[in-house]
């Protein structure tokens, strides 16, 4: 299984392949069952529709290991926005946070600080 995981990570880092998968009809067809949307609003809207079927939802932001603190902060910003929308729209959902996306491989203290910030209530 590590080989398959490595292959998917490599593909996700390939801008041409990622763009094709995100923007082509073929890519959308392959991922639409698993990807609620490319934008937060789309994902939350789909989550609400699933909630209406009596199903709890887990959302995450696609991505894996980051290569800079800036990328980790951008990933954290997406999760903050997602959590704010879940709360504001009363969606029955939680989020799945990947610590590698929060910078764990760069700096464990950075990942810890970002993870803790995600647990704090917005003002």
Image (tube, rainbow, N blue to C red):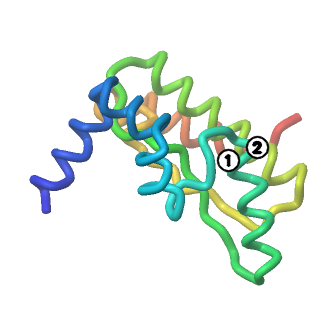
x and y percentages locating residue 75 in the rendered image: 53, 32
Which residue, as the protein is rendered here, is positioned at the far bottom?
54
**Residue 46, relative to residue 6: is it above or below?**
below
State the separation of the CA atoms marked 1 and 2: 21 Å
x and y percentages locating residue 4 in the rendered image: 16, 55
The residue shown at (32%, 22%) is 67
Q: Earlier in the sequence, mark 1 or mark 2?
A: 2
| Residue 64: quarter of image | top left
x and y percentages locating residue 59 in the rendered image: 60, 57
x and y percentages locating residue 112 in the rendered image: 48, 38
Q: Quadrant of the C terminus?
A: top right
Q: Nearer the viewer, mark 1 or mark 2?
A: 2
- Side of 18 where 110 appears, left or right: right
10 Å crowding of disc 1: few (<14), some (14-19), many (20+) = few
Q: Quadrant of the N terminus?
A: bottom left
- Side of 43 where 30 appears, left or right: left
The residue shown at (42%, 44%) is 99
Which residue, as the protein is rendered here, is positioned at the far left?
3
Judging from the image, what secondary structure is the residue with disc 1 in? helix
**Label of residue 41 in the image:** 2
Question: What residue sits right under mark 1 in the picture?
Answer: 119
| Residue 81: quarter of image | top right
> Looking at the image, which is closer to me, 30 or 108?
30
**Residue 78, relative to residue 45: is it above or below?**
above
Judging from the image, what secondary structure is the residue with disc 2 in? helix
The residue shown at (10%, 53%) is 3
| Residue 30: quarter of image | bottom left
């Amino acid at each position: 299984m590590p080989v398959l995981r490595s292959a998917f990570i490599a593909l996700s880092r390939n801008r041409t392949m990622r763009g094709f998968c995100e923007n082509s009809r073929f890519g959308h067809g392959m991922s639409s069952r698993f990807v609620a949307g490319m934008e937060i609003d789309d994902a939350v809207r789909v989550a609400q529709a699933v909630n209406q079927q009596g199903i709890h939802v887990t959302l995450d932001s696609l991505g894996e290991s980051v290569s800079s603190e800036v990328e980790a902060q951008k990933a954290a910003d997406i999760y903050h926005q997602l959590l704010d929308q879940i709360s504001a729209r009363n969606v029955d959902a939680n989020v799945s946070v990947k610590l590698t996306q929060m910078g764990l491989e760069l700096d464990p203290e950075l990942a810890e600080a970002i993870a803790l910030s995600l647990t704090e209530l917005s003002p």
